[in-house]
Image (spheres, rainbow, N blue to C red):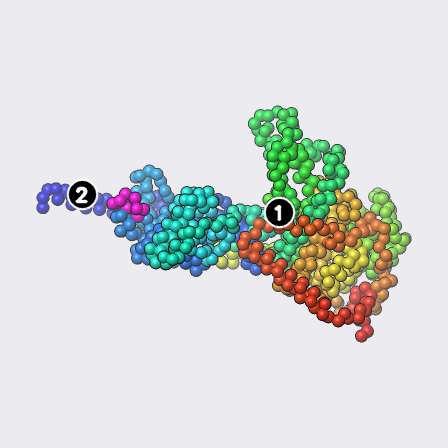
Amino acid sequence: MSKPSRIFWRLFFFGITVFIVFIVMINFDLFGPLPSLKQLENPSIMLATEVYAEDGTSMGKYYKDKSNRSNVEYKDISPNVIHALVSTEDERFYDHSGIDGWSVMRAVVKLGRDGGGSTITQQLAKNMLDQGSKNIARRFIEKLKEWIIAIKLERNFTKEEILALYLNKVPFSDNVYGIRNASRTFFQKEPDRLTVDEAAVLVGMVNAPTLYNPRRNPKSAIERRNTVMNRMYKNSFLSEAEYASLKAKPIDLSSYKRIDENNGLAPYFRDVIRDELKRWCKEHKNPATGNAYNLYEDGLKIYTTINPRMQLYAEEAVAKHMPVLQKVLAGQSNVKKGLVWKDHKNVLDGYMKSSDRWQSMHDDGVSDADIRKSFDQPVQMKVFAWNAKREKDTVMSPLDSIKYSRAMLETAFLAMDPITGAVKAWIGGIDFKTYKYDHVNINTKRQVGSSIKPFLYSLAIEEGNFTPETLVQNTAQYFPGSGMVPAAGKCGGRGDTVTMATALAYSLNCASAYIIKQVGPDRFADFIKQINIPTKVEPYPSIALGSCDLSLYEMLWGYTMFPASGFSSKPYYLSRIEDKNGNVLDRFDSERKEVISQATAYTMCRMMEGTVDIGTAAGLRNRIGVTEMGGKTGTTNSNSDAWFIGYTPQLLAGVWIGCDDRFISLDGKLGNGGTSAAPIWEYFFTKAIADKTLALDKQAKFVQPENMKTEGVYDYQNIIDKTPPPGAEGVDAGNGNANEYTDTSTQRVPVDSKLSGDEEKVLHEANNDNKKKDINTSNQKENATPPEKKKKGFLKRLFGGKDKE
């Protein structure tokens, strides 16, 4: 052998030896740690936590940056995606064991002009190791690491599992990670429904997400998509005719919707439970890491009790009625002319100083005087508006924008199963994107007004030997140390005495003052605690009229005792928490406690029908068409707060309406609970009752205690005066007819939830089902022979009496 040959072979074997030594050193972590076999079997891909409704509908996610992804199994990925990926990135994927020698040689010989030599498995390894150094020497070592990990991956995973791991891990454009999120973002569909051309668009973005983003660079994206489809054609995944037809199509991005935390069902609800879930994470360790669970990275699955259809019906109700109320408020002279701020300039000043604009200018060293001047200068801006876009472009001064924003009527809506306590719908405000503050949760308290009276009447029946026909004084009452209650002495236009049933139906304040005088303010305050309402209520006589502040959450908690036969059911909204692999980590269930007797609960249910039959929400039960229901309105001083809480045997819901600044409110009749809050409740219940999939029975009845079935029957006519008073609820008589205050233009306002394609389908199907039912019902009514009507007394219904046939 010649000397040159000997030198060549020595260098060759030396190079091989050095290469092997390098590999061994890398494998023993001398150039940085490699994932262990256990870590490879359980790759630590950062995953967003996903929230689900009771039927499995995805409601939204909690994530930060790269964790905004959702895992999907191989079987749930369209074959079009798999074929596009393999054809484009690794034609011999099914033939190699992690490293493709031919591709490596081609890349070396042609210096990468025809593509790199990395297989799909190597690219996965690169992503798992988070590598990509620009330094040549360091990149060489990284490449060797990727080879080692690629071989280990091939030994421990099937080809299908590797493909699924890769597609779940890789970044797409617009800060989207994983095939599922990419599919949802660009085409509003799950990855198993992607067509050939859609799959080609997404796979085309894998190696250069920004360059081939169809939204930013449509021309480059089309060229790249066609390149991917050409490779699919060459690998026999497409026929020539299919390829020719598809490459001529434009890229359709009409469904593009960026995924963010404002998207999805019930945004207020998801924002509220976030803090509760964070606490849960701190208290529970992830066995894979030994650390507390991370809400944003560990891919938890949160299953809730929210019903998607009920949630959307509630949001429709808000979008239909709130614009009407807002139009009236905006047109009021004191709001329109800014007079409402005359005595509250210090409040307005506080809003200015807490604004981002003020803080930013202050940090830049601008004087307070100059900052204040800037708030009077008109500028272009977007503000919330009740229209199809839920916003409008306008020109106004920053100061006027504050006044505009603060004069927005807010609302809260909560619906739940009164027996189990499962929350079905939750709306915390009018627009989550603009107004993040939630008005449902237990910490947001407002004056409850007359909606508290059913608690007082329950105590009087439970412990004071009161009955619906008991006569009570309808005159202002004197309390030592507190004076007259009500202070104004307004007694709803009735005589000196009325039955207790009449007093509740028309919400007579003086009668309630008389009742609390009999049971005692201290006992009533204790009773509120006894029925599980957490907020401490001070024992002032005025609490009989609802002078205390409580949350909508607490009020519904209290009202559950009526349809639930005396049991208080705590509202709960989480059903279970699973890890990313579907293992159940925690379960949640009802918390029930008997707080009043079944007889008292039943009596209150039937007595509260007076409110929705002839009282402050007259005609409501008849319009909805249910056999039995109860309800109560509530209105506070100056109409600052309007309430309606109502229920059937199967469903309980409550509505609150008011401005965040209590000195801004609706004037006159439209400001009370019967006309401002009840219509939202009515619209929701009308839709829910009509939806056959919700299985709400119109003929459902409250459970009547056995010992009450044999008691005497009283005549409804003699207990509740049917003539509406000049004023009630301390001047709060109102008719909650949703049709009385309507505006057809509000039908164009979309719901607050930013819906995915699947969620839009849920709403569309629900509305179509209801329309079909309405048509069928209408036809049945036209063809039916009207039955002979028989009047039935209120307390015949109340105590179970039957009409003679």
- The percent coordinates of residue 501 (x first, y second) are 82, 58
- The percent coordinates of residue 234 (x first, y second) are 33, 55
The amino acid at mark 2 is Leu
Query: In the current view of this chain or complex, which residue is farthest to the left?
Result: 1
Examine the image and state in which quarter residue 328 appears: top right
Q: Name the residue that disc number 2 marks.
A: 11
Q: Name the residue that disc number 1 marks.
A: 388
- Quick one: 103 or 127, which is closer to the camera? 103
- Quick one: 674 or 12, which is closer to the camera? 674
Q: Is residue 733 magenta?
A: no
Q: Circle 2 — which element? A: helix
Q: In the displayed structure, would residue 793 be above or below residue 386?
A: below
Q: Which residue does the image show at 72% across and 41% down from the upper left?
A: 330
Position of 443 compared to 14: left or right?
right
- The percent coordinates of residue 132 (x first, y second) are 36, 42
- Mark nearest the camera among 2 and 1 is 1
Q: Circle 1 — which element? A: loop
Which stretch appears magenta? 107-117
